[in-house]
Amino acid sequence: MQKRSVGKSDLRVTPLCFGASGLSNMPDTYGYEVDEARARDTLRAIFDGPVNFLDTSNNYGFGRSEERIGAALRERGGLPEGFVLSTKLDRDMETGRFDAARVRRSIDESLSRLGLDHVPLLHLHDPEHARDLGEITGTGGALDELFKLKEEGIASAVGLAMGRIDVMLPILRERPFDALISHNRFTVLNRSAHEMFDYAHSRGIAILNAAPYAGGVLAKGSAQMPRITYQPATEATMKPVKAVEDICASAGIDPGALALQFSMRDPRVTSTIVGVSKAARVAQTLNWASQDIDPAVWTQLDTLPFSSEDPEADRDYKPG
């Protein structure tokens, strides 16, 4: 696979990135469980494949995702050369504290679980859920500490990973981030990140677009997974999904392929993050990324309505 630069850093990543939140066993979010053996097989498939990019976070499964990745890395003798591992700093999940001291605690926890002394890419994660945004953005706060970690060589590049665009874009404008992660907000169903992507692209910030399947429904299908962005769907909210499925059925293609390539074909997007929780999904993702899609299908897709509202505004958020 070709590789692209992460902002102005020396990191180069494939246009696909695998996300490891599901590997941590988060049934409240995804609706299914993932045991150790399944996680191990999935990670082996990732590291044996052509994708050189894996994303996780301190709080995925309250640390279980990083622990499982760390075990896989030990099995291989460390992080493979040229492989880019991304993780995230997280607030204290009990108190919501996200100050400079918590940043240091978070990275220490992550490095210990992963068995590493530095990470290629490090993001500050979900500041909108912390107890005090000023604790993060103020002088001597979490963001200052994030950039110190880059200066110290603990991270090669740094980014911002979060949901709410109204909080995220002002922060992006204030600091020289190498990358951003946005999820569920640039899909065939929702384009609320469009303005932010324009800004980031103009500033040379690498755009890592996560959750192209709107939480999984575009990959698994509306019949099997009647949920959108991790929330139970109604007949009305499922209508746009079924419209996409109808177009794909007429064209003889998988809705997952259309959803994935919608993100991958956008010239602003550096890499698309796809969550996987079993080895078969790794192979399926690679297949969908290369599936031929007739240009007429994209023309049809352009005729469908899409939302520009926050897709998670009514989400019942359950951390970990």
Image: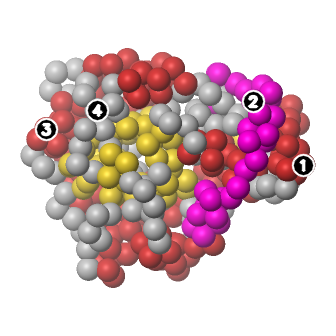
Closer mark to the observer between disc 3 and disc 1: 1
Q: Earlier in the sequence, mark 4 or mark 1?
A: 4
Q: CA distance from mark 3 to mark 4?
A: 13 Å
- Residue 217 visible in the displayed image: no
Q: CA distance from mark 4 to mark 2?
A: 32 Å
Residue 219 lies, with reference to residue 47, above or below; the image says: above
Q: Please, what secondary structure does the residue beneath circle 3 have?
A: helix
Q: Is residue 275 left or right of residue 245?
A: left
Q: Earlier in the sequence, mark 4 or mark 2?
A: 4
Asked whether disc 4 touches disc 1, contact meaning CB atoms under 8 Å apart, the reply is no
Residue topped by disc 1: 250
Q: Amino acid at mark 4?
A: Phe
Closer mark to the observer between disc 3 and disc 4: 4
Residue topped by disc 4: 177
Q: Amino acid at mark 1?
A: Ser
Q: Please, what secondary structure does the residue beneath circle 4 have?
A: loop
Residue topped by disc 3: 148
Look at the image and say whether residue 112 sits in the magenta stretch. no
Find the magenta span and give its range. Answer: 282-311
Q: Please, what secondary structure does the residue beneath circle 2 have?
A: helix
Q: CA distance from mark 3 to mark 1?
A: 53 Å
**Scheme by which the image is coloured:** secondary structure
Closer mark to the observer between disc 4 and disc 1: 1
Indicate which disc residue 302 carries: 2
Quadrant of residue 82 within the rendered picture: bottom left
Closer mark to the observer between disc 4 and disc 2: 2
**Mark 3: few, some, or many residues within 10 Å (few <14, many ≥20)?**
few
Look at the image and say whether residue 305 sits in the magenta stretch. yes
Q: Is residue 168 left or right of residue 114?
A: right
Q: CA distance from mark 4 to mark 1?
A: 42 Å
